[in-house]
Amino acid sequence: MIALGPIEIMNHTPWHFLAACVLLVLFFIATFSDDQNLKTKLRKIMYVVFGFLVLAGCYVWTLVDFSLPLLIKSIGGFALFWVMIQLTKNRFNKLYWGLFILIAAVGLTLAFVYI
């Protein structure tokens, strides 16, 4: 397997990062919208985009060697998505916002430093 850095991985898997950006945009719109019908529709779309994100993430696993940081980041992605869904239902929950920031910070750190 070729040792790829974060920039090379991004260059090989642009769909993974594009899907993550789309998911974040949908998340923030759904979280801060007051229209419950819109929230429900956006949550359904978020599930579809997350499914694509997982498939694109599986391709990342073929580019890098298995490591504990990769496993933690992957499991953290599922945890982050669950927290995001909870925040779209209740945006005032401080515990979920704290988890969102913590999981995202750890995931980004692992992605850019260790993987």
Image (cartoon, rainbow, N blue to C red):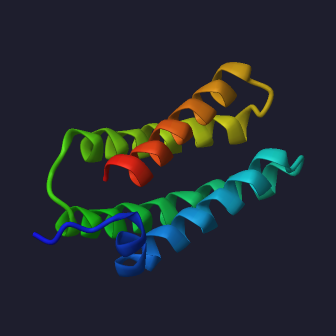
Q: Nearer the viewer, residue 55 or 44?
A: 55
What residue is shown at x 25% (from left), y 43% (from top)? 71
In the visual, does 106 lie left or right of 91? left
Whether residue 45 can be seen here: no
- Single out the residue that lies furthest toward the left: 1
- Single out the residue that lies furthest toward the right: 34
- Single out the residue that lies furthest toward the top: 95
What residue is shown at x 35% (from left), y 70% (from top)? 9
Q: Quadrant of the N terminus?
A: bottom left
Instruction: Tell me where residue 4 appears, x and y as whole percent.
Output: 27, 68
Instruction: Tell me where residue 39 appears, x and y as whole percent.
Output: 75, 52
In the visual, does 67 lie left or right of 1? right
In the visual, does 66 lie left or right of 47? left
Residue 33, above or below 57: above
Residue 14, above or below 22: below
Q: Nearer the viewer, residue 41 or 88?
A: 88
In the visual, does 30 lie left or right of 11? right
Total numbered labels placed on residues in the image: 0
Q: Nearer the viewer, residue 8 or 31?
A: 8
Residue 100, above or below 94: below
Quadrant location of residue 43? bottom right
What residue is shown at x 27% (from left), y 47% (from top)? 70
Whether residue 23 can be seen here: yes
Quadrant location of residue 13? bottom left
Instruction: Tell me where residue 79 appears, x and y as whole percent.
Output: 45, 37
What residue is shown at x 78% (from left), y 56% (from top)? 29
Instruction: Tell me where residue 91 appears, x and y as whole percent.
Output: 77, 34
